[in-house]
Image (tube, helix red, strand yellow):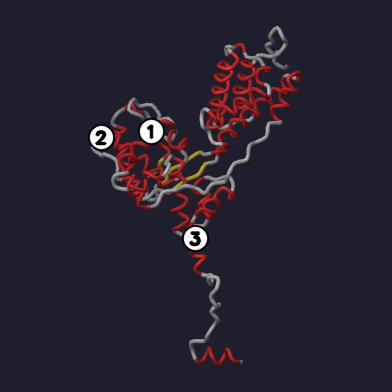
Amino acid sequence: MAKKLALTESNAPLVGPLLQTFFLDHLTRQKRASPQTIHGYRDTFRLLVHFLQTTIGKEPARLVMTDLDASAVLQFLEYLEEHRHNQVQSRNVRLAAIRSFTRMVALHDPASVGIATRVLAIPVKRSNKRLVGYLTRPEMDALLAAHDLQHWTGRRDHALLLTLYNTGARVSEMTTLQRTHVTFGLKPFVQFTGKGRKERAVPLWPTTTRTLQAWFKELAADPRHGTMAFPNARGKPLTRDGVHYLLEECVARAIAHCPSLATKRISPHVLRHTVAMHLLQAGVDLSVIALWLGHESMQTTHGYLEADLATKEHVLEKITPAGQPVKRFTADDTLLHFLATL
C-alpha cells in the first residue's frame, strides 16, 4: 500500500518526507546504491536545502515540492559555479542527484510530474576536456620523503601516501580501508570495494608491505584505533577533507626540495592519475591499468594515453619531418642486395 504523502495547506507535498523515502527506501533498499553514492547525494541536498533556506527564508522542514521547481534548481546550480567556484563536472554531479530525486517524486506524487519534468529538462552543461594532471617520479619521491617519521602522524601519512601511490586507490576507498583488507604473505595484496560495488585486489610492493606491517603493528598496540587502516589522532576514520589537508601539508614541506610541485594543483585524485601514468610509461597495457584502478570503462583509462607526451614523442620519432626527403630502404648486405635486385 502506497505511503500517504504529507501535504501542506497548498496541497503540495513536503520535501522532508520525500527525501526520507528517497534515501531510506529508493536508494538503499530498491537500488542498493553504494555508500559513496548515498553520501554524494546527501551532500547535494544539504547544499540545496541550505541554499533555499537562505534565498527564500523558509525552514528546511517546511519546504514543499513547489520550492524545488526548475528555476530554483537553476539558481542553485549557478550558485555552485559562481559562489562556491565548483567546476562544471561538480555542477553536473549535483544535477544528477536532483534529477534522480525528482524521478522518484514523479512516481509517488502525480501532481508533481510537472515540476519533475521541468527539472529533468535542465541540460547537462558541457565542459572543456582537459589533459589529465599527474606528478613526475622525482616529484612523487619528494612527497614520499617529506614526512617526519619520528611522529605518529608522520608515520601514518607516509604509509597512507605510499599505499595511495602503490594502489591508485580512490580517497573514499582509503578512508574506509580496514586492516583486515590487507593480506600479507608470499604475495601481499590489498582488497578494495570501489564504485558499483566492484571488488578488486591490488598487489603490494615489498616497500609498501614492510611499511604497512610496521604501521599496523603500531596501531594494534592501541585499542582506540579499532580496525581502521588509517585513523585520525582520535581513533576515528580519516575524512576526505582530512586526507586533502595532510596532502597539502606534505606538499608544502616537499616544495623546498622539489620546486616544480609549487606549479601544480595536487589532490589525492592527482595521485591516482600519477599511478596510471607511471604504469603506462612503464609499458603496462591499458586494459591492465583499467583493472588496477577499477575503471568501469576503458574509455576512462584512454584519457591517460591522450595525456602521455612521451608516447606521442616516440611516435613522432618514427615520422620523417616535413621538408626532408623520405629515407628509402638500402640493402646493407650483399645477399640482401642480390635479393632486392630480383
**Three-letter residue code for mark 3:** Thr
Name the foreground residue: 226 vs 339: 339
Label 2: which secondary element: loop
Q: CA distance from mark 2 to mark 3?
A: 41 Å
Sequence-wise, the earlier of marks 1 and 2 is 2
Q: Which mark is residue 325?
A: none
User: Label 2: which residue?
Assistant: 151
Name the foreground residue: 76 vs 230: 76
Q: CA distance from mark 1 to mark 2?
A: 17 Å
Label 3: which secondary element: helix
Q: Nearer the viewer, mark 1 or mark 2?
A: 1
Sequence-wise, the earlier of marks 1 and 3 is 1
**Three-letter residue code for mark 1:** Tyr
Q: Circle 1: is it few (<14), some (14-19), or many (20+) Cα within 10 Å?
A: few
User: Label 1: which residue?
Assistant: 245
Identify the residue at the far left of this view. Answer: 150
Give how far across and how far down residue 137 sits, in percent.
38, 52
Give how far across and how far down residue 146 sits, in percent.
30, 42
User: Label 3: which residue?
Assistant: 311
In the rendered image, the vertical position of residue 67 relative to residue 291, given as above or below: above
Residue found 29% across the figure and 44% down from its top: 256
Identify the image quadrant of residue 237.
top left
In the rendered image, the vertical position of residue 160 relative to residue 341, given as above or below: above
Identify the residue at the far top of this view. Answer: 9
Residue found 35% across the figure and 27% down from its top: 235
Sequence-wise, the earlier of marks 2 and 3 is 2
Q: Circle 3: is it few (<14), some (14-19), or many (20+) Cα within 10 Å?
A: some
In the picture, which quadrant includes the N terminus?
A: top right
